[in-house]
């Protein structure tokens, strides 16, 4: 049986390990709850034996975290505190705690407990790809957000198509509280709504459009009917030309313009159905004069610059100039390093994808509107090509929309959704996104946990392609130490000394075999790095020399459970002038982690 023991007393560690191994069990021993959490979610164990009073994370915090990620893994408490009635009552509230053993405990009773345990079949949860979660009414509390962080959330998305500034500020505060409690930096992504075109209000909330009939779309507001309705953006009316298709409600209904005009257009209903109020309108063939950035977007962006937001996503990008305009506004404000994500959901963006990638800090493949603006059959190939180009330019890419959509109302995904997520990971996406699944779904924590398990399963089989090996050789001249570490075998983790946060994107690109530990003084850098695949941040604020920084980081990595005594740690450093005056272009060291 595979047993994980959490015990901070060295003498008790030796005793428990020796007795259990003598009985034929495989035993791993750690000294605090966070070490135990990292091991328990990176390996497969049949049972955990845990003390209560431990440093860093105590037993209660460990149990709470494990209840989120591996609720089926049984835990036996071994502690003198078990004789305290209040402690016992508290422990009874956890479904994964199956028994208590007061110290010094009876090994014969422990063996009886072990004999009843079934061998575990769960998978490890040490994923490399990132999970972006949309925050909404179903998950806006600090408690639920904390459990989503434990389950695998790396980036929290605030959708500015909905909600007030007061609501977003409260949500942001809850995210930061959960982040602090669980010690994991979380990037916050503001998603600007852009010039989203919608219908006006319909009489009775919805009207019927019959195929073959005529309907007028007008600029002036009106109560919609089956013969006439309005749009919330009247400036689009002159841009609609004869023959242009108009897709309504994510393409469920289709119109075709038969008579154009400046104040209204007449359309034939090609595909009819029920049209509700404020439904989306997509105009795939129309050349619009609307700006990509609305006045509301500029106000929302200014709000983000005054709050702890890390990324801003621009909707309905059409060209690289749209991204540059946002970046210029951020630079002029001079308030914070807010990075820009380009959402690819328009045909114009697909046509200019290389230029957009070159100026963007990240890309989001927004497949919802993209699949309406373009034939849906083209979306998988477009997704694959964008992921390839982003990898080539070392720009993180998020694959979004309807990834686990059925889990909005159900506890399990469809097989097609599992395959969709798995294929995105196989293609090399840095992150996958959840939308209404977490914002309004029945169980946001379960959705994140499910997404993480799919990622982990696919990553077990990932490897570099021939094309990627060729790119590795090409990149080796620019970052020799970073690319060299990608070819190493035998190291347990890679430690990157990167105080300014300039090198971790390259390490993320190449080091996909073992954990990449980014050493930085900046929480802001650590939050940005949360969008990059396989980057875990160690924040060390002291001003230390290189040797002292390595020692501090190595001991922190041991304390958090990423490495243990005897492991080989690869240490990477970038350009600097050494104390001896040498011009260092890169450094790679291999260090054996010392004993306690």
Image (cartoon, grey):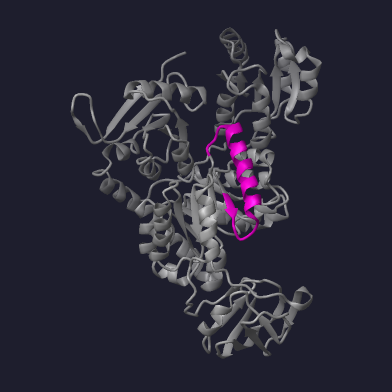
* Left or right position of 65 against 369: right
Instruction: Please give the name of the residue rendered at 55% of the width and 79% of the height, measured from the top-left corner.
Output: 235
> Can you say whether 29 is above or below 384 in the image?
above
Residue 151's quadrant in the figure? top right
Asked whether residue 164 is drawn in magenta, I would say: yes
Q: In this picture, which residue range is highlighted in magenta?
A: 157-185
Asked whether residue 547 is drawn in magenta, I would say: no
Instruction: Please give the name of the residue rendered at 62% of the width and 80% of the height, measured from the top-left corner.
Output: 254
Q: Looking at the image, which is closer to me, 234 or 500?
A: 234
> Can you say whether 129 is above or below 350 in the image?
above
- The image shows residue 140 at horizontal and vertical percentages of 67, 46
Main SS of the magenta segment? Answer: helix
Instruction: Please give the name of the residue rendered at 61% of the width and 32% of the height, measured from the top-left corner.
Output: 181
Q: Looking at the image, which is closer to me, 288 or 6?
A: 288
Q: How many marks?
A: 0
- The image shows residue 295 at horizontal and vertical percentages of 53, 65
* Left or right position of 438 against 566: right
Residue 24's quadrant in the figure? top right
* Left or right position of 554 against 545: right
> Can you say whether 537 is above or below 476 in the image?
above
Q: Quadrant of the N terminus?
A: top right
- The image shows residue 252 at horizontal and vertical percentages of 65, 74
């Amino acid at each position: 049986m595979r047993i994980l023991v959490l015990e901070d007393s060295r003498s008790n560690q030796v005793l428990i390990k020796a007795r259990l191994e003598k009985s034929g069990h495989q035993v791993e021993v750690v000294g605090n709850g966070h070490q135990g959490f990292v091991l328990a979610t990176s390996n497969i164990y049949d049972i955990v034996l845990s003390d209560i009073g431990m440093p860093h994370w105590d037993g209660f915090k460990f149990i709470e975290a494990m209840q989120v990620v591996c609720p089926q893994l049984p835990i036996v408490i071994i502690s003198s505190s078990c004789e305290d009635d209040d402690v016992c009552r508290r422990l009874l509230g956890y479904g994964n705690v199956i028994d208590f053993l007061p110290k010094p405990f009876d090994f014969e009773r422990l063996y009886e407990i072990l004999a009843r345990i079934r061998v575990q079949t769960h998978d490890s949860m040490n994923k490399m790809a990132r999970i972006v979660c949309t925050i909404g009414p179903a998950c806006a509390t600090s408690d639920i957000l904390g459990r989503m962080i434990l389950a695998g959330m790396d980036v929290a998305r605030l959708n500015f198509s909905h909600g007030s500034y007061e609501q977003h500020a409260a949500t942001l505060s809850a995210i930061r509280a959960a982040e602090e409690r669980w010690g994991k930096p979380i990037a916050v992504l503001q998603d600007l709504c852009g010039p989203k075109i919608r219908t006006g209000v319909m009489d009775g909330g919805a009207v019927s459009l019959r195929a073959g009939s005529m309907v007028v779309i007008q600029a002036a507001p009106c109560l919609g009917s089956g013969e006439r309705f309005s749009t919330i953006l009247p400036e689009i009316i002159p841009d609609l030309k004869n023959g242009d298709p108009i897709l309504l409600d994510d393409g469920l209904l289709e119109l075709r313009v038969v008579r154009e005009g400046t104040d209204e257009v007449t359309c034939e209903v090609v595909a009819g159905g029920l049209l509700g109020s404020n439904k989306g309108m997509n105009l795939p063939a129309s050349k619009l004069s609307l700006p990509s950035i609305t006045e509301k977007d500029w106000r929302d962006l200014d709000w983000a610059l005054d709050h702890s937001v890390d990324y801003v996503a621009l909707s309905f990008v059409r060209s690289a100039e749209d991204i540059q305009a946002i970046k210029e506004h951020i630079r002029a404000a001079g308030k914070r390093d807010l990075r820009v994500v380009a959402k690819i959901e328009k045909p114009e963006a697909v046509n200019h994808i290389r230029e957009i990638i070159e100026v963007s800090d990240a890309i989001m493949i927004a497949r919802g509107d993209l699949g309406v603006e373009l034939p849906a059959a083209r979306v998988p190939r477009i997704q694959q090509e964008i992921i390839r180009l982003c990898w080539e330019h070392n720009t993180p890419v998020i694959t979004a929309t309807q990834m686990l959509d059925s889990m909005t109302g159900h506890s399990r995904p469809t097989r097609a959704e599992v395959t969709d997520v798995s294929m995105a990971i196989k293609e090399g996406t840095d992150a996958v996104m959840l939308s209404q699944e977490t914002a309004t779904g029945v169980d946001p924590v379960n959705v994140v946990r499910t997404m993480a398990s799919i990622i982990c399963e696919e990553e077990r089989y990932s490897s570099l392609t021939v094309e990627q090996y060729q790119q590795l050789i090409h990149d080796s001249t620019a970052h020799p130490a970073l690319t060299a570490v990608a070819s190493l075998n035998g190291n347990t983790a890679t430690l990157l000394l990167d105080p300014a946060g300039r090198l971790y994107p390259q390490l993320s690109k190449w080091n996909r075999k073992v954990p990449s530990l980014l050493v930085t003084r900046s929480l802001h850098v650590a939050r940005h790095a949360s969008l990059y695949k396989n980057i875990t941040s160690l924040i060390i604020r002291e001003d230390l020399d290189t040797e002292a920084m390595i020692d501090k980081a190595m001991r922190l990595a041991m304390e958090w459970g990423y490495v243990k005594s005897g492991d080989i740690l690869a240490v990477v450093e970038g350009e600097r002038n050494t104390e001896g005056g040498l011009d260092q272009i890169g450094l790679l060291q291999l260090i054996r982690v010392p004993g306690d």
